[in-house]
Amino acid sequence: MTESISTEINLQEEEANKLYVARKFQQASDTYSQAADNYLTNGQEVRAAEMRNNQCVALLQAKHPGDALTAVKGTALIFETAGDKLKQAMAYANEATALKDLGKKPEAIVIFTQAAGLFRQLNENEMYLEVMQSISALKFKSRNMIGALFSMQEGLRQVEKPTFKQKLLLKLLKIPQNLLEK
């Protein structure tokens, strides 16, 4: 890739980031898509996958989960092949969020669980907690109260320095567990 093409794509990416910060999510999505296409054309599959993930987030913000799912599909595999587990986990989390927003709760739980496993391996405790909270919320909405409680509890257990609120929530979550064990 020539330097001028590289500079052009980088400027496109910067423009997309500015549009996103300005909350112009649809325009940001379109610009991320163009950058992804340009990166792909120039043989930079991983950078293209990063742009597709950014596009997914912009589309989720624009309330277009179907398009977001289309944008992010397959990017986790690209990151896995490249050996980037953090971006792979983030891609799974984005995909699961799109599935959740589409009302596909069981599929979202499966993909969120994959993301959680990777975040846990990487000791990304805050991201792990966020994903576990999403799993818990989905289980709660599916009327799987026990699963929701255990998912939330598992997520909170991984926090090294829990806040007062998190400590309190952990204590409260132990009440139903203790009742179930009796």
Image (cartoon, rainbow, N blue to C red):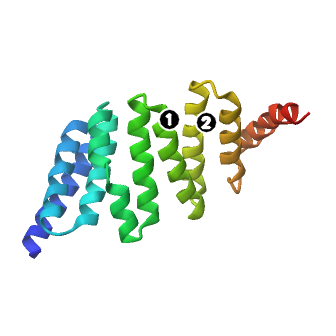
Of the numbered discs in the image, which one, if any, rests on residue 106? Answer: 1
Is residue 26 visible in the rendered image? The answer is yes
Where residue 134 sits: x, y (%)?
A: 54, 38
Horizontally, residue 15 falls left or right of residue 108, namely: left
Amino acid type of the residue that numbered disc 1 sits on in the rendered structure? Pro
Horizontally, residue 13 falls left or right of residue 163, namely: left
Label 1 secondary element: helix
> Closer to the camera: disc 1 or disc 2?
1
Q: Does the residue at mark 1 contact the one at mark 2 (Cβ under 8 Å)? A: no
Residue, disc 2: 136
Residue at the extreme right: 182
The relative height of residue 68 versus residue 77 in the rendered view (above or below) is above
Residue at the extreme bottom: 2
Q: Nearer the viewer, residue 34 or 20?
A: 34
Measured Cα–Cα span from mark 1 to mark 2: 12 Å
Horizontally, residue 175 falls left or right of residue 75, namely: right
